[in-house]
Image (spheres, rainbow, N blue to C red):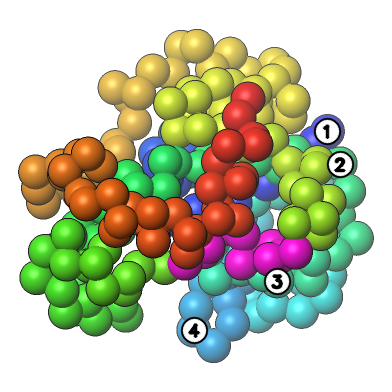
Amino acid sequence: MNIPVYYHIPKCGGTYVITKCKEILRFHYHGISAIRVNKNNETLVRCFVRKNIRELDIDIHDDCLLKYLNDILFITIEPGGIKLRDKILNNISNIHEFMIIRNLFDRTQSMYNYLTSQASKHEPTHGVIRDKTFEEYLKNANYEKNWISSQFSQDKNILINKLKNMRIYKIRHIEKAISDCFSACYSDIDCSKYNDNLVNRHENTHKTQKIEVHNIPNEVIQKFLNHNQMDQFIYDSYDI
């Protein structure tokens, strides 16, 4: 059996993917538990496991998940854990790796809106953005630069090699990503009966007006793209 390994890229539908997969597994297995892998009080990995395992927290180290391998149903590599994925997944084979990506402009705008709203008050980065508007944020280039690729490699050849076994979906294909995951790992589970109305999406209730890319000066957008060439390469090159 393959074990799903989902790489959680911020503001790319991660809460929805994780919640829906958790609910499907919980229903199918009549309950599940959780294991969290931590480092310095930050959760790097969340695993759904069979309910015979008590919920627990463990510190990261080589082979930290190996003793639970027969009971792990789903692995989420959280943003802080992506760079440490080799240590986390050490000696674990037969995995189905996938992640969801999003248009860079939309993801950046979503991140700005989130970090400047009360929805992010629990985040350590809440309030760090001083730009009063998204346009100002772009003009001052205070956004993350090549965040996704920097988690893997800024060398294009190395990046391609690291992503070669991963299934990468644009956010519009999020349902296909979930369906493909269960087809590859749990062929006896019919995902079609679990529609998104059954999933608590925990959406950000702080609504803001979306700014379209054509309303931003071209030189600002060009600078933004120049700062994010590697992430744009991923977005343009990978789409299932």
Q: Vertically, is 224 above or below 96?
A: below
Query: Image quadrant for the N terminus?
Result: top right
Give the labeled residue for mark 2: 94
Direction from residue 92 to residue 79 in the image, left or right: left
**Residue depicted at x 81% and y 59%:** 158
Q: Nearer the viewer, residue 57 or 90?
A: 90
Give whichever of discs 1 and 3 has the lower sequence position. Answer: 1
**Between residues 219 and 34, which one lies in front from this camera angle?**
219
Region of the chain picked out in magenta, as a range: 145-155
SS of the residue under disc 2? loop
| Residue 143 image-quadrant placement | bottom left
Q: Amino acid at mark 3?
A: Leu
Amino acid, disc 2? Asn
- Asked whether residue 41 is drawn in magenta, I would say no
43 or 126, which is in the foreground? 126
Sort mark 2 into few (<14), some (14-19) or many (20+) by Cα contacts within 10 Å.
Answer: few
Q: Is residue 222 above or below residue 88?
A: above
Determine the secondary structure under disc 1.
loop
